[in-house]
Amino acid sequence: MSALPNTMPTSSEDKEKLLALLRESRERFLGSFADVSDEQSRCRLAEGCWSVLDTVEHVTMAETLMLRLVSGPRRPRPAGAPNREEIFIERVGNRNRKVEAPERGRPSGRFAGLDEARRQFETARAGAIRFVEETKDDLRATELTHPHPMFGDVSACEMLIIMAKHAERHALQIEEIKNSLAFRGGQG
């Protein structure tokens, strides 16, 4: 999308902040399951709970969709629209509040294994990083509707923050799964 009239490109300082969030959360997310075998990745703590593979699938699919939305056509952000960047930085990455994934974001066995899901995540995240690096747009001057109704309309900048923090949130979920007795085969 080309820059909107009467807007300035996102500052290099703001781009660097977004890039740092995206890169750091990528490393944290990938690191959360780096030591998980394919067999372990399928372990569910209980009926209805997600496995590590399910969690990676969810993040990968959400990341792919959010990238498509943020890099596609966006509409001008209305003057006076709230800036929720700091709120999203603070809240999206923690697991204090349970959030139900939208139906299309729920795991459904899309990937044969953890490596395939990881590669797809890496591709989507690389696309998000490339988008931020290359965009000439003012990422605060355009908006789109987030696929989860709890977020509603967000600026492109807010969407990128949500992407980064969403991966961090699920890195914590993976750590919870790995720390469970069921995942470790009942060994304390």
Image (tube, rainbow, N blue to C red):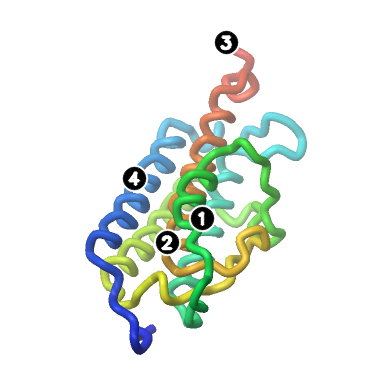
Pointers 1 and 2 in contact (C-beta within 8 Å): yes
Q: Which residue is mark 4?
A: 24
Q: Which residue is mark 3?
A: 188
The amino acid marked with disc number 1 is: Thr
The amino acid marked with disc number 4 is: Glu
**Looking at this view, is 66 or 57 the one in front?**
66
Counting from the top left corner in percent of width and height, residue 107 is at 65, 52
Counting from the top left corner in percent of width and height, residue 78 is at 52, 78
Q: Residue at x 70, y 37 (%)?
A: 49
Q: Earlier in the sequence, mark 3 or mark 1?
A: 1
- The quadrant holding residue 24 is top left
Whether residue 158 is visible, yes or no, is yes
- The quadrant holding residue 51 is top right
Q: Residue at x 33, y 61 (%)?
A: 129
Q: Which residue is mark 1?
A: 60
Q: Earlier in the sequence, mark 1 or mark 2?
A: 1
The amino acid marked with disc number 3 is: Gly
Circle number at residue 124: 2
Q: Is residue 20 above or below residue 144?
A: above
Q: Residue at x 71, y 59 (%)?
A: 103
Which secondary structure lies at badge 1? helix
Between the C-alphas of marks 3 and 4, the distance is 31 Å
Q: Earlier in the sequence, mark 4 or mark 2?
A: 4
Q: Is residue 108 above or below residue 37?
A: below
Between the C-alphas of marks 4 and 2, the distance is 15 Å
Q: Using a 10 Å C-alpha cutoff, classify the residue at mark 3 as few (fewer than 14 neighbours), some (14 to 19) or many (20 or more).
A: few
